[in-house]
């Protein structure tokens, strides 16, 4: 009979695996979707997955360095969303569409 | 089954389902709503990991500010259901999904094989038992050991704010006619 202890005992592994699943979902979104807004949402998902594993390790080792790193990640994520959405607005002004195939027209 | 275990499974299933619906919904406003749901459940996961202050920051910054930014931009665009929501090509799509699956399998396999031997008893810090103590320890660490990074982030945010305003005021993006 297989052991069911992984269901009833929550360890740091559970949080790490949850983080890996979230990161993979975000990566699938970045690879498969064409809308620039949904692409940014998927990037936010990936950053959140990384935050979960930072906090899980921080709690596991009893140090707060991981939580400080989560602060920095959150700030960078907010800045990245602001710049990315400004780029999306400038794409939309010109092409009336936010599909990423229009990004090739940005060169030059 | 104790309450902690039930809360963990409930929150993780909620997080994964709402994250999947971010990727799978074809209407972007539904994706934004699912993303807000994901942010809130990630904040609850932070609470179960005893990172109370970070849970509050997650709610304010992500579920508040970033989501408002996304929804405002979506309202500017007035998007309907997209005809071409996903990338074209069955073959390349299959390759992409396979790559994602291989990555997920690698990470889960690595975590499962190396960390399960380390045992389940986490060495928790005894002086972060209450939420006020945890927040005090976090703030002392931030302002004593990482104060340079904190100040650098302040400068970065200023630059980003100026750059965002300049970028969104320019007519026609990089194709501006002078």
Image (cartoon, helix red, strand yellow):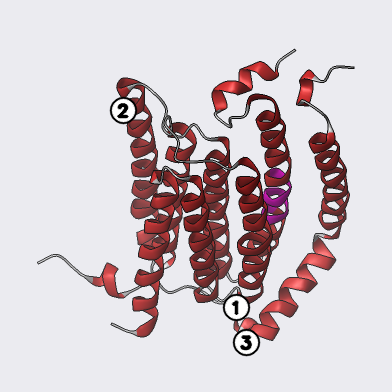
What quarter of the picture does the N terminus of chain B occupy? Answer: bottom left
| Residue A30 versus residue B89 in the image, above or below | below
- At mark 1, the secondary structure is loop
**What residue does disc 1 label?**
B125
- Report the predominant secondary structure element of the magenta stretch: helix
Total marks drawn? 3
User: Mark 3, residues whose alpha carbon is within 10 Å: few (<14), some, or many (≥20)?
Assistant: few
- Badge 3 and badge 2 in a common chain: yes
Residue found 46% across the figure and 55% down from its top: A19
In the image, residue A14 lies in the stretch drawn in magenta = no
Residue found 85% across the figure and 17% down from its top: B177
- Nearer the N terminus, badge 1 or badge 2? 2
Q: Is residue A3 visible?
A: yes
Distance from label 3 to label 2 (Cα)?
A: 48 Å
User: At which x and y percent is residue B136?
Assistant: 75, 79
- Badge 1 and badge 3 in a common chain: yes
- Nearer the N terminus, badge 3 or badge 2? 2
**What residue does disc 3 label?**
B130
User: At which x and y percent is residue A88?
Assistant: 66, 35
In the image, residue A74 lies in the stretch drawn in magenta = yes
Residue range of the region highlighted in magenta in the rendering: A73-80
- Nearer the N terminus, badge 1 or badge 3? 1
**What residue does disc 2 label?**
B94
| Residue A98 versus residue B91 in the image, above or below | below
Q: Chain of mark 3?
A: B
User: At which x and y percent is residue B111?
Assistant: 39, 52
């Amino acid at each position: 009979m297989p052991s069911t202890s992984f269901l009833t005992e929550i360890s740091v592994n559970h949080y790490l695996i949850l983080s890996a699943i979230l990161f993979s979902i975000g990566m699938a979104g970045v690879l498969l979707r064409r809308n620039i807004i949904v692409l940014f949402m998927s990037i936010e998902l990936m950053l959140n997955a990384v935050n979960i594993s930072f906090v899980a390790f921080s709690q596991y080792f009893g140090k707060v360095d991981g939580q400080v790193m989560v602060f920095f990640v959150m700030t960078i994520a907010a800045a990245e969303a602001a710049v990315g959405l400004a780029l999306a607005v400038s794409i939309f002004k010109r092409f009336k569409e936010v599909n990423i195939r229009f990004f090739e027209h940005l060169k030059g | 089954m104790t309450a902690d275990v039930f809360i963990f499974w409930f929150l993780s299933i909620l997080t994964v389902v709402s994250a999947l619906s971010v990727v799978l919904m074809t209407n972007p406003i539904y994706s934004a709503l699912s993303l807000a749901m994901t942010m809130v459940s990630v904040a609850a996961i932070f609470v179960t990991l005893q990172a109370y202050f970070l849970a509050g920051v997650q709610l304010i910054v992500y579920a508040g500010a970033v989501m408002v930014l996304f929804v405002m931009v979506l309202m500017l665009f007035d998007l309907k259901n997209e005809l071409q929501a996903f990338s074209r090509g069955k073959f390349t799509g299959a390759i992409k999904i396979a790559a994602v699956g291989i990555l997920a399998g690698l990470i889960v396999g690595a975590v499962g094989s190396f960390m399960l031997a380390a045992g389940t008893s986490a060495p928790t810090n005894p002086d972060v038992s209450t939420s006020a103590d945890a927040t005090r320890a976090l703030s002392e660490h931030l302002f004593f050991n990482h104060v340079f990074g904190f100040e650098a982030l302040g400068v970065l945010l200023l630059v980003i704010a100026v750059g965002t305003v300049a970028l969104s005021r320019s007519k026609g993006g990089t194709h501006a006619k002078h």
